Image (tube, grey):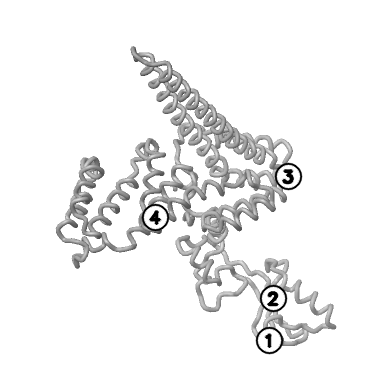
């Protein structure tokens, strides 16, 4: 599933969420043992872990709600059956035995569902605890290892969003981080996305039914868009009477809030699918299914408190925002600059240029800053390197300097000192 919702999820700033409280606790614990230089880095890292805790927490709540609805429905059916038998004045012995046997069978089914539901809830609770423990384990001694696990989690997140489930699973298993990633959540979304790409709305409508109350609370239009598309497909198939019946049953309840969109779609009964009118022709284009896929991704991420963009993109953009300058898009941009590559340029396109009051010269050889303590020197061919690098090269080659870019060989005495103004 290529999920490209709400940065850091949705929530009120007035109240402290359980995820925020947990991250704050982890920061407090780490501060007792971590040096201030590394504490700052650790604190900033933990601030970005909202999704890490929010997703399993939302999944846990969803599991509880699903189990509650299932049990409530089954118990209600059992009570209704018992009431019917009890109110029956004339019932034979055989019918009574048959009714009791049926009730016992149904109760056993409820027991099995309760056990399965309890097991699923325990797994979700265990996953939440594992992630809290992981955040709590961050300190100066294992910061490098902790960052390595974080990188693997980010890669698994990216693979899962891009539908590389097998690769994501293998990386998670080899790194023993199955409880720290959300592959199963993305696989749940994959069923809906695959259905939409096959031009089937059934899985998506089932998902809407499972999350009806939350979608209604967020004023989502996703189910309405699905119903519109199903109506359009009936018109495309020239099944007009069925389309009218479908509209009366499924679209009319949306008329109070989405009247204009409804009127536009209903007009397709008159203009038909072969219309050349741009206003209605677009409704029959295949890209409408792509729009539904994007809409679902947004709703899915919003429900679980995920970011719209993959975490890998967010972290890369954070770094690129400090490197992006107008020079990065010039033809003679140095190959050492990440923004010389088209993929990074595309990722940095929506980012602003970094604010730099003064230019900084960095030595091509040592990657160190060239300043008054380590001034730049110019070779006869015009290339500039730091004094430290050139002295080390001259000492190893009997006073000779070889330009690493062009291969020019010259003496150290041929160098000209450059001054930074």
The quarter of the displayed image where residue 389 is located? bottom right
| Left or right for 226, reference 113 | left
| Res. 319 mark | none
The quarter of the displayed image where residue 165 is located? bottom right
The residue under label 2 is 385
Q: How far is the residue under mark 3 from the one under mark 2?
A: 36 Å
Q: Residue at x 56, y 33 (%)?
A: 116
The residue under label 4 is 196
Q: How far is the residue under mark 1 from the one under mark 4?
A: 64 Å
Q: In the rendered view, would you say 210 is above or below 324?
A: above
- Residue 203 drawn at (x, y percent): 40, 48
* Mark with earlier residue (1, 4): 4
Q: In the rendered view, would you say 225 is above or below 396?
A: above
Q: How far is the residue under mark 1 from the one under mark 2?
A: 12 Å
* Mark with earlier residue (3, 2): 3
Q: Residues within 10 Å of mark 2 (few under 14, many from 20)?
A: many
User: Which structural element holds mark 2?
Assistant: strand
Q: Residues within 10 Å of mark 4 (few under 14, many from 20)?
A: many
| Left or right for 330, reference 239 | right
| Left or right for 84, reference 411 | left
The residue mark sitting in front, 3 or 2, is: 3
The residue mark sitting in front, 3 or 1, is: 3
| Res. 140 mark | 3
The residue under label 1 is 380
* Mark with earlier residue (1, 2): 1
Q: Residue at x 53, y 64 (%)?
A: 324
* Mark with earlier residue (3, 1): 3
Q: How far is the residue under mark 4 from the one under mark 2?
A: 57 Å
User: Which structural element holds mark 1?
Assistant: loop
- Residue 152 drawn at (x, y percent): 64, 53
- Residue 292 drawn at (x, y percent): 36, 54
């Amino acid at each position: 599933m290529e999920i490209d919702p709400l940065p850091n999820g949705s929530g009120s700033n007035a109240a402290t969420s359980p995820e925020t409280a947990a991250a704050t606790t982890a920061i407090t614990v780490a501060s007792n043992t971590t040096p201030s230089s590394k504490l700052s880095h650790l604190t900033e890292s933990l601030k970005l872990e909202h999704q890490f805790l929010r997703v399993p927490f939302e999944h846990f709540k969803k599991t509880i709600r699903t189990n509650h609805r299932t049990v409530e429905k089954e118990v209600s059916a059992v009570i209704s059956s018992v009431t019917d038998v009890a109110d029956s004045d004339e019932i034979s012995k055989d019918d009574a035995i048959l009714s009791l046997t049926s009730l016992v069978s149904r109760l056993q089914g409820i027991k099995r569902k309760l056990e399965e539901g309890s097991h699923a809830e325990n797994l979700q609770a265990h996953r939440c605890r594992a992630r809290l423990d992981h955040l709590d384990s961050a300190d100066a001694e294992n910061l490098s290892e902790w960052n390595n696990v974080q990188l693997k989690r980010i890669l698994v997140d990216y693979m899962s969003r891009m539908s590389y489930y097998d690769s994501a699973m293998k990386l998670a298993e080899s790194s023993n981080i199955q409880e720290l990633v959300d592959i199963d959540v993305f696989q749940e979304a994959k069923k809906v996305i695959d259905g939409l790409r096959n031009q089937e709305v059934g899985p998506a409508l089932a998902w809407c039914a499972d999350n009806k109350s939350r979608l209604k609370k967020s004023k989502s239009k996703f189910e309405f868009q699905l119903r519109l598309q199903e109506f359009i497909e009936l018109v495309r198939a020239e099944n007009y009477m069925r389309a009218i019946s479908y509209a009366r049953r499924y679209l009319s309840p949306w008329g109070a809030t989405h009247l204009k969109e409804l009127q536009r779609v209903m007009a397709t009964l008159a203009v038909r699918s072969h219309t050349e009118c741009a206003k209605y022709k677009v409704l029959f284009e295949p890209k409408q299914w792509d729009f539904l896929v994007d809409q679902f991704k947004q709703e899915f991420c919003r429900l679980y408190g995920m970011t719209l963009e993959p975490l890998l993109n967010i972290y890369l953009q954070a770094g690129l925002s400090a490197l992006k300058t107008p020079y990065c898009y010039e033809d003679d941009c140095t190959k050492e600059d990440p923004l010389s590559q088209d993929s990074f340029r595309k990722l940095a396109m929506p980012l602003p240029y970094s604010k730099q009051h003064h230019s900084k010269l960095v030595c091509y050889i040592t990657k160190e800053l060239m300043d008054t303590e380590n001034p730049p020197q110019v070779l006869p061919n015009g290339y500039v390197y730091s004094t430290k690098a050139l002295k080390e090269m001259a000492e190893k080659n009997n006073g000779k300097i070889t330009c690493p870019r062009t291969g020019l060989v010259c003496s150290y005495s041929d160098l000209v000192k450059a001054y930074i103004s």
